Amino acid sequence: MAKKLPTVLLRAGEDRRVRAGHPWAFSNEILMDAETKALAPGTLATLRAPGGEALGLVTFNPHSLIAARLLSSNPEATVDALFIGRRFAQAAALRDRLVGVPYYRLIHAEADGLPGLIVDRFGDAFVVQANSAGMEALTPILLEALEAEFSPSTIVLKNDSPVRELEGLKREVVTAKGEVGSLELIENEARFVADLSGGQKTGWFYDQRDNRRFMAGLAKDANVLDVYSYSGGFGVLAAHRGAKSVVCIDRSQAALDSARQAAALNGVDKIVGFEKAEAFEALEKQKSRGFDVVICDPPAFVKSRKDLKTGAQGYRKLVRLAAPLVARGGFFFVASCSHLVDPPLFAEQVRRGLRDAERNGRILLSSGAALDHPVHPGLPETAYLKALVLQLD
């Protein structure tokens, strides 16, 4: 018989959001008596309404602002390798249908029913990020389920995200299985190289897959500038799809080395050039004003609420420096992965940057992350990626 889970009780009047479909309960919504405060971070618990009705099964961390994360609306669920494996299988079936090759984000946290968990798939290699105390506690079961579903050759626990500190967790990278280094992946019918242990995030940014394909479709016979190029996802694909020339700029030599390898793998190394530089400095020094396509995919400028004003202005400055480099009639792509910068604020900074640069044009596309990064309907604010494609006059 399954052992009885501890209860986490919502305060009077604080059950409306959870009943409406929100998958979190915040610490100030929970009755934090001595017994509840004493629960270990990551404990599985039954979340109950003020009257005692069971609302679901949660992972609970008394020390985190997001104290309870809904794992199942069935309070009687048994969380074992079979439970997790079903979620993995369901997520994989969706991605196989959407993406078609086994290179994708397999688990995107709450949207895939595993709150606080990220899993990126690189063929038979998997990179796991447990960003909550609940997923940290469930890691042995997660690994068992991964093994049962996929028989992976490699599993990396890339637990180095700053959000882990908010959960009271240490940051570390551990190889749980196999050997780690760089490996090849396929995206948009082109070949790329990802560094699973040393690269940013999980080693690759699958979230821009669809945007890369769109921009590559505009790049035939074009001169392309790819700023914050990382491992060449935009620039190398543009060359693969027929760009006349591509310049990739990034401050990371390791990322540029990966991009150079990708260019060689796709037979476009004569078309793509590489420059190691800070983006803003490189844009200010750029002599060519005639790029047919300019791509700016920066890291997050806003990492916390206190950075919001200055970080948001960073996007305005980026547009002010990049827009003059776009030829008349050319295309400009700019993105923000700062979740605190909402779409209206981002669009406003882009508009101001264009005015500063004395450029005008039209927005052709407003988009977000690729389809393997779904959004939980109760957490629309987790749709962090925003991208605009413009044609400039």
Image: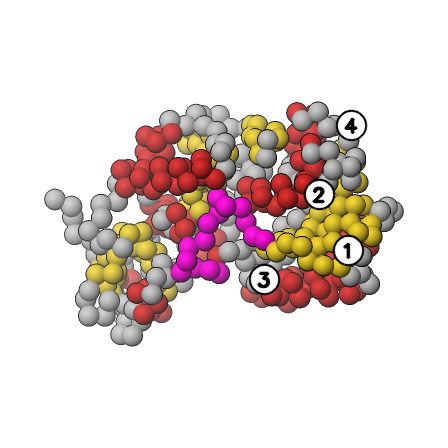
**Three-letter residue code for mark 1:** Leu
Residues under labels 2 and 4: Cα distance? 20 Å
Residue depicted at 16% across the width and 48% down the height: 3
* Residue 317 appears anywhere in the view: no
Q: Main secondary structure of the magenta part?
A: loop
Between the C-alphas of marks 1 and 4, the distance is 28 Å
Pick whichever of labels 1 and 4 is earlier in the sequence.
Answer: 4
Q: Amino acid at mark 4?
A: Lys
Kindly identify which residue carries mark 4: 270
The image shows residue 129, relative to residue 11, as above or below, that is above
Q: Label 2 vs label 1: CA separation?
A: 14 Å
Is 340 or 222 nearer to us in this picture?
A: 222
Please give the range of residues in magenta.
Answer: 367-381
Which label sits on residue 218? 2
Decide which of tag 1 and tag 3 comes sooner along the chain. 3
* Marks 4/3: CA–CA distance: 38 Å
**To which quarter of the image does residue 223 belong?**
top right
Q: Nearer the viewer, residue 54 or 129?
A: 54
Task: Identify the residue shown where x is 73% and y is 51%.
Answer: 332
Q: CA distance from mark 1 to mark 3?
A: 20 Å
- Tell me the SS state at disc 1: strand
Farthest-out residue, right: 287
Q: Which residue is mark 1?
A: 392
Horizontal side of 139 relative to 333 (left or right) equals left
